[in-house]
Amino acid sequence: MRLSRDVTLLSFEAQEVIALRMLRLAGGGPVAEAEVNRMVDEKVTAFVEVAATIATGGAAEHVVSKLRRKVRANGRRLRR
């Protein structure tokens, strides 16, 4: 049940970050460009980390926990 709860929370938290990023991107300019670059870098890094964790037998709970920490940090940064 905990994994299901954490995945559900991750999906809600990610939706908030997506909305905040879209607002930032809509403003255009250097801030938007920096956000796009940051977003792409984060996605590539997250993919590699998740793939490595799964390939080495890591648990799904660990992957979700790590992703939630990163998503929450993005949310805090974007809300400022």
Image (cartoon, rainbow, N blue to C red):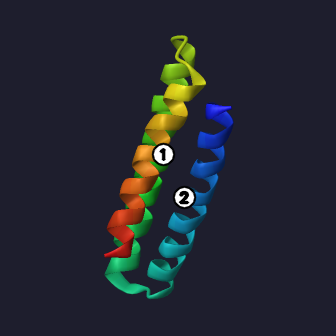
State left or right for residue 74 relative to residue 9: left
Q: Quadrant of the N terminus?
A: top right
Residue 25 position within the rendered picture, expressed as x and y whole percent measured from the top left? 48, 79
Q: Quadrant of the C terminus?
A: bottom left
The residue carrying pointer 2 sits among few (fewer than 14), some (14 to 19) or many (20 or more) residues within 10 Å by Cα, namely some
Answer yes or no: do the residues labelled 1 and 2 have beta carbons within 8 Å? yes
Residue 11 position within the rendered picture, expressed as x and y whole percent measured from the top left? 63, 53
Q: Residue at x 59, y 50 (%)?
A: 9
Q: Secondary structure at mark 1?
A: helix
Residue 11 numbered mark, or none:
none
Q: Residue at x 49, y 74 (%)?
A: 20
Q: Residue at x 45, y 58 (%)?
A: 39
Residue 40 position within the rendered picture, expressed as x and y whole percent measured from the top left? 46, 55
Vertical relation: 35 (above or below) 11? below
State left or right for residue 19 relative to residue 48: right
Q: Earlier in the sequence, mark 1 or mark 2?
A: 2
Q: Splitting the image into 4 quarters, where does residue 22 fall? A: bottom right
Residue 78 position within the rendered picture, expressed as x and y whole percent measured from the top left? 38, 71
Q: Secondary structure at mark 2?
A: helix
For label 2, the residue is 13
Residue 68 numbered mark, or none:
1
Task: Say which amino acid is labelled 2.
Answer: Glu
The residue carrying pointer 1 sits among few (fewer than 14), some (14 to 19) or many (20 or more) residues within 10 Å by Cα, namely some
Out of 15 and 44, give the one closest to the viewer: 15
Task: Say which amino acid is labelled 1.
Answer: Arg
Q: Residue at x 33, y 66 (%)?
A: 77
Q: Residue furthest top?
A: 57
